[in-house]
Amino acid sequence: MRLNPLCDATWTYDLIHEVEPSGRRDGRVYGQGTGTLTGRLSGTASWSNFPRLREGYASPDARGVIHVDDGIVLFTLTGLSSLADGRGVHVLTFQTEAPAHRWLNDVIAVGEGSIDVEHARLAMRYYECEVELPLPDVELP
């Protein structure tokens, strides 16, 4: 698999409501915010997130819209983020009718970056996953 640069993003929470984990139950957060993306995918975003909290990690479950030059791009975002050291990994998919951005409909993107829990901000770098076939040294049974 080849990872092609897609964009850098900053995400900022504008609203957060949290229910701490208790007993054998996971905690949950509801958050809303905005973002700025620069690179092959550039625009401004509005989103909401409903991550699950467990044992020092957050599993994001976000949906949002990116406003681009020729329309909008909807996205979904999942992943895993450490609340202790701020490391985060995301997976994104996209859906759009914007003519210059339709190529995103076939993209799965992965991202890495850092989460500033105290200030409710994230700085991420995303890559388009490009499958390289045939897979070297892998044979079908």
Image (cartoon, rainbow, N blue to C red):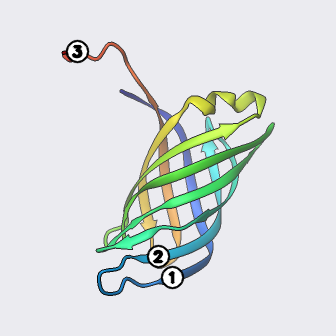
In this view, the residue in front, 17 or 87, is 17
Amino acid on which disc 2 is placed: Arg
Q: Extreme right residue here?
A: 70
Amino acid on which disc 3 is placed: Leu
Q: CA distance from mark 1 to mark 2?
A: 6 Å
Neighbour class for label 2 at 10 Å: few (<14), some, many (≥20)? some
Relative image position of residue 129 (x, y in whole percent): 44, 32
Horizontal side of residue 13 vs 139, given as left or right:
right
Under circle 3, the secondary element is loop
Horizontal side of residue 57 vs 70, given as left or right:
left
Which residue is disc 3 drawn over? 140
Q: CA distance from mark 2 to mark 3?
A: 42 Å
| Quadrant location, the C terminus | top left
Which residue is disc 2 drawn over? 28
Q: Mark 3 vs mark 1: which is more N-terminal?
A: 1
Q: Quadrant of residue 7?
A: top right
Relative image position of residue 16 (x, y in whole percent): 58, 78
Which residue is disc 1 drawn over? 18
Neighbour class for label 3 at 10 Å: few (<14), some, many (≥20)? few
Q: Quadrant of residue 84?
A: bottom left
**Do the residues bearing badges 1 and 2 touch, measured as CB atoms within 8 Å?**
yes
Amino acid on which disc 1 is placed: Glu
Relative image position of residue 112 (x, y in whole percent): 41, 50
| Quadrant location, the N terminus | top left
**Do the residues bearing badges 2 and 3 touch, measured as CB atoms within 8 Å?**
no
Horizontal side of residue 22 vs 33, given as left or right:
left
Indicate whether 75 appears above or below 12.
Answer: above
